Image: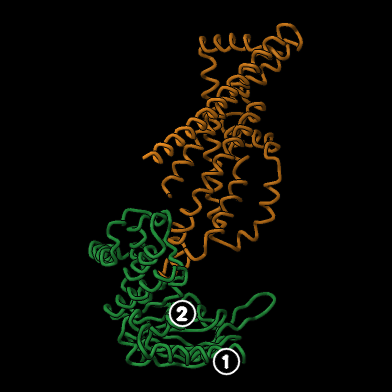
Chain colours: A orange, B green
């Protein structure tokens, strides 16, 4: 009985210790956040930094409230979010389909190998002007930019994971006389699903790059456009506000994919 | 004609550096309902021969007939069990068991009920909705056996299916596989490097030598051991002398 009491009190202590550490970490994170914005505000007001370039949190906050009340900000956010989500989904899908084709034909994959290497090394945003000329300055070319930046790396990662599937799973299916299509459906694709989901995480970030650069080049709406516009009229409050919104939205999108990854992993264990 | 006929079969693997002969001039027949073991050191081409019989590869020389046909042309006559269970971790036990039927497009109410009753006979009914990760090694190999038997093959190829298990589980599973195959009157070919396992399970043992793999000697298992279950056979008086005989032959192979 005494022994049990001792164990349970030790366990309580252990749990308390973990809780304390967690609380400490959260407090530090909040303090760091507050300190950053406070120092920024103070530095700007006392003109330790040039307020014209670095603006200040209070100015950004007022601009944000303004833009929300005249409803223009919401429109720009929706435009950019739609472009990013579309680019990201198209890029991932196209990359997975390309990987499937490469897996289907090992000969084709050997033939295309050097081209994939070159395309992967190429900075995709450099294709921007060509895309705009080919597809017209607008929505289509921006979404294409968002997709193009992620499609090749997706192809390579997913194809690699297709090839790394344990050959014994394929052997099991072959002994049942499975066709190549059945082997793909039953073993290759499901066992590579975690790899595909984890490329999603990378692709979210890449698609943001593609879309923002695309908006720099052509758009007259969206958060990337706001940054470029603010830069042209030297309104850095607008630039920094857009930047902060992008940071928040990108983080939310990344977290959503991380949750998706966790859910699929759960189904497997 | 015998159920399995292997006629002057040789098989060579090709790599850019070399041509490697894995098995040489194999001559073997298996009658329906027999249990055969292929025994030998690792690298003697046992698994290659099994893959050839399964029709996963075509021999470089010679011919193989199973039930009067080339193995490649056969559908659901041959079941194959690997060294590990290779259950698909993203499928439930039930989905794993029904995999063969699904792939062969033979999944219907009757075949499904059959497979599930087989699962029940193996004492696995209550785990059908679990995933492979939740099961022990012995249970998983039993599920793999059900998966193989679900398509009702006439010939079973067993590629060291007990080698990854702990000793106690292995002995129990040997008994289970033996009884199951006998009761369904299946023909079976077992690949193993365990002399005891070969003796207690089979009717005839082919001892292989390596470099390239060929049949060194054939042992007929004494009648009194054949009729016993593997666990009983291991305790029978004639087990040890027979074991010694094969052991000596294996030793002579390694020294010679």
Q: Secondary structure at mark 1?
A: helix
| Mark seen at residue B252 | 1
Q: Is residue A41 left or right of residue A249?
A: right
Q: Nearer the viewer, residue A15 or B68?
A: A15
Q: CA distance from mark 1 to mark 2?
A: 21 Å
Instruction: Mark 1: give few (<14), some (14-19) or many (20+) Cα within 10 Å.
Output: few
Q: In the image, residue A88 lies at what x, y percent?
A: 55, 37
Q: Quadrant of the C terminus of chain B?
A: bottom right
Disc 2 chain ID: B
Q: Nearer the viewer, residue A24 or A218?
A: A24
Q: Is residue A267 left or right of residue B23?
A: left
Q: Secondary structure at mark 2?
A: strand
Q: Is residue B136 above or below residue A42?
A: below
| Mark seen at residue B191 | 2
Instruction: Mark 2: give few (<14), some (14-19) or many (20+) Cα within 10 Å.
Output: many
**What residue is at 33 percent from the left and 82 percent from the top?**
B232
Q: In the image, residue B63 lies at what x, y percent?
A: 47, 87
Q: In the image, residue B163 lies at what x, y percent?
A: 47, 72
Q: Earlier in the sequence, mark 1 or mark 2?
A: 2
Q: Quadrant of residue B36?
A: bottom left
Q: In the image, residue A30 lies at what x, y percent?
A: 58, 20
Instruction: Tell me whether the residue at label 1 lies in contact with that at label 2, contact meaning CB atoms closer than 8 angstroms.
Output: no
Q: Is residue A119 above or below residue B96?
A: above
């Amino acid at each position: 009985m005494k022994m049990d009491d001792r164990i349970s009190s030790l366990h309580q202590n252990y749990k308390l210790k973990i809780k304390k550490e967690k609380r400490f970490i959260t407090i530090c994170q909040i303090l760091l956040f507050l300190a950053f914005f406070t120092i920024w505000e103070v530095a700007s007001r006392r003109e330790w930094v040039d307020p014209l370039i670095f603006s200040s949190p209070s100015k950004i906050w007022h601009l944000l409230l303004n833009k929300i009340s005249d409803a223009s900000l919401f429109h720009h956010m929706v435009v950019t979010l739609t472009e990013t989500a579309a680019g990201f989904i198209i890029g991932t899908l196209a990359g997975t389909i390309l990987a499937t084709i490469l897996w289907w034909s090992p000969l084709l994959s050997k033939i295309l190998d050097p081209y994939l290497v070159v395309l992967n090394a190429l900075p995709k945003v450099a294709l921007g002007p060509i895309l705009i000329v080919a597809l017209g300055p607008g929505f289509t070319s921006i979404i294409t930019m968002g997709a193009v930046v992620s499609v090749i790396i997706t192809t390579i990662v997913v194809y690699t994971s297709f090839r790394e599937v344990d050959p014994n799973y394929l052997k099991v299916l072959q002994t049942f006389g499975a066709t190549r299509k059945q082997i793909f459906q039953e073993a290759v694709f499901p066992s590579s699903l975690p790899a595909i989901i984890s490329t999603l995480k990378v692709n979210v970030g890449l698609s943001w790059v593609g879309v923002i650069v695309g908006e720099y080049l052509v758009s007259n709406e969206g958060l990337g456009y706001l940054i470029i516009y603010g830069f042209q009229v030297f309104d850095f409050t607008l630039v920094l506000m857009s930047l902060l919104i992008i940071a928040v939205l990108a983080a939310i999108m990344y977290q959503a994919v991380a949750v998706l990854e966790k859910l699929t992993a759960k189904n497997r264990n | 004609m015998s159920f399995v006929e292997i006629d002057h079969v040789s098989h060579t693997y090709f790599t850019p550096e070399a041509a490697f002969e894995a098995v040489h001039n194999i001559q073997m027949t298996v009658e329906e309902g027999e249990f055969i073991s292929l025994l030998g050191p690792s690298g003697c081409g046992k698994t290659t021969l099994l893959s050839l019989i399964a029709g996963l590869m075509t021999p470089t020389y010679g011919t193989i007939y199973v039930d009067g046909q080339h193995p490649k042309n056969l559908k659901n006559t041959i079941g194959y069990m690997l060294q590990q269970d290779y259950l698909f971790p993203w499928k439930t036990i039930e989905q794993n068991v029904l995999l063969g039927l699904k792939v062969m497009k033979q999944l219907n109410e009757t075949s499904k009920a059959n497979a599930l009753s087989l699962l029940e006979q193996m004492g696995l009914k209550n785990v059908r909705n679990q995933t492979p990760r939740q099961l022990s090694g012995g249970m998983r190999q039993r599920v793999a056996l059900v998966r193989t038997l679900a398509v009702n093959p006439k010939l079973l190829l067993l590629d060291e299916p007990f080698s990854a298990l702990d000793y106690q589980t292995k002995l129990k599973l040997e008994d289970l596989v033996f009884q199951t195959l006998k009761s369904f009157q299946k023909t079976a070919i077992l690949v193993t490097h365990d002399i005891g396992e070969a003796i207690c399970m089979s009717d005839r043992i082919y001892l292989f030598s390596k470099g390239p793999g060929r049949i060194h000697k054939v042992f007929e298992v004494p009648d009194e051991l054949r009729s016993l279950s593997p666990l009983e056979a291991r305790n029978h008086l004639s087990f040890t002398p027979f074991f010694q005989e094969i052991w000596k032959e294996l030793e002579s192979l390694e020294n010679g």
